[in-house]
Image (spheres, grey):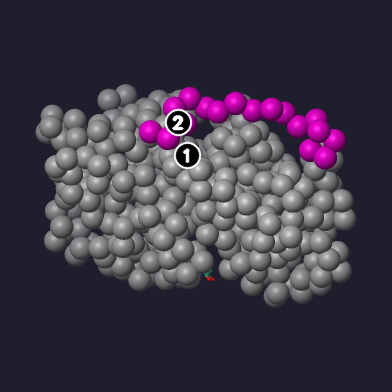
Amino acid sequence: MHIVSIVGARPNFVKIAPIARACCGMEGVRHTLIHTGQHYDRAMSDSFFDVLGIPEPDVNLNVGSGSHGVQTGKVMIAIEPVLQELQPDWVVTVGDVNSTAAAALVAVKLGLKTVHVEAGLRSFDRTMPEEINRLVTDAISDELFVTEQAALDNLKNEGVADEIVHFTGNVMIDSLVHALPKVEAAQAWKSFGLEKGSYVLVTLHRPSNVDQRESLEGLVHALSDISKRTPVLFPAHPRTKARLEEFGLLAMFTESGRVHLTAPQDYQSFLSLVTGARAMLTDSGGIQEETTYLGIPCITLRPNTERPSTINLGTNELVTPEYKPVMEAFGRIASGSWKEGTVPPLWDGKAAERIVRILGELDGQGR
Ligand code: UD1
């Protein structure tokens, strides 16, 4: 059985690592990895391959950045001849980035059997590019692998046939479970002169939070005030760094003196920083799941989430990304009144093995 996996952006790397490992460990499975090159900086891409132990991509399409149309179109143009040549038994896409939807569209039109891992998640917010990518990829894929109950419910409501939906758990948590021994030993907070449990960790990159001066300024103001009580560590996505500079907001951090603005971290260092944090402030998708698994309080700076189990079961809460609500939520964490969480079902480190095993069974049945 020949499986081709597609990766493009940072969260994809984390999700594909356990799938690549499971393919390696299964007899009769050949795995080919295609990197679209959507993320290309060392800190955003190569360092993840190193730390996660992902094999070198067999093909790199080097598409780089661009508007959504340009980026999606470039992936489609570049990947078509590669998939046509390879003719795999399965094309595996993960997550919700532009590379995911672009690859699925091409694979399906070539008549290749196409799989979406992390299917069925819905924020019901069509202004998010990721929501469009999720809807498109799910609508056209042949087999759907899901991480949580809400995704099963969403697919049912959309009329998707039960037999193509497989509840296998969460490959992002597979990576986390695999990395945990090294993550715990790393104590990455020490290199920033911080103590375990004494700082707030922040990531921000969503266009709705960082691309408008007013929105970003409110959040920077909140971080600056939080840092007067608790040091803030902020590994900034290149987009966010550029906006902070463009809007002249870096001075607010310098004045407070307790906001450590750093480059994006590699996977292991970042997770180590999560395990040592008093709390997480983020607008990411995957970090909501990682903090839930680790039991770290998470303030998600978004009006909605496609991952509701992190709220219903986990340690996550949605907070309006404005000064006042952020300060109020942080106050509840500082006073120790944040909720305790539990780990959602099947987030046990074995999702990728289940997925590859099911693909083998389906292949055997001629599906
Ligand atoms: C993408 C995903 C988002 C995911 C995020 C994780 C889409 C629609 N969005 O958003 O879901 O949460 O990745 O990081 O696919 N840039 C660099 N170096 C890089 C990559 C990007 O400098 O290696 C800069 C460029 O200026 C680029 C901008 O970041 O224009 C945005 O990159 P892009 O890949 O378009 O989207 P992300 O915001 O990273």
Which image quadrant for residue 194? bottom right
**Could you tell me which quadrant the N terminus lies in?**
top left
Residue 134, numbered circle: none
Can residue 279 be seen in this snapshot?
Answer: yes
272, 64: nearer the viewer: 272
Residue, x 44% and y 57% (percent of image)?
A: 51
- Judged from the image, the secondary structure of the residue bearing numbered disc 2 is loop
**Could you tell me which quadrant the C terminus lies in?**
top left
Asked if disc 1 and disc 2 are in contact, CB closer than 8 Å, the reply is: yes
Boundaries of the magenta span = 333-350
Q: Amino acid at mark 2?
A: Asp
Which image quadrant for residue 212? bottom right
Residue where numbered disc 1 is placed: 177
Residue 128, placed above or below residue 244: above
Residue where numbered disc 2 is placed: 348
Outermost front residue: 185
- Judged from the image, the secondary structure of the residue bearing numbered disc 1 is helix
Q: Amino acid at mark 1?
A: Val
Return the x and y of residue 289 as percentages of the image width and height: 55, 39
Residue, x 80% and y 43% (percent of image)?
A: 330
Q: Is residue 108 magenta?
A: no
Return the x and y of residue 159 as percentages of the image width and height: 36, 27
104, 298: nearer the viewer: 298
Q: Is residue 338 magenta?
A: yes
Residue, x 71% and y 69% (percent of image)?
A: 244
Q: CA distance from mark 1 to mark 2?
A: 8 Å
User: Residue 274 vs residue 225: left or right?
Assistant: left
Return the x and y of residue 87 as percentages of the image width and height: 14, 53
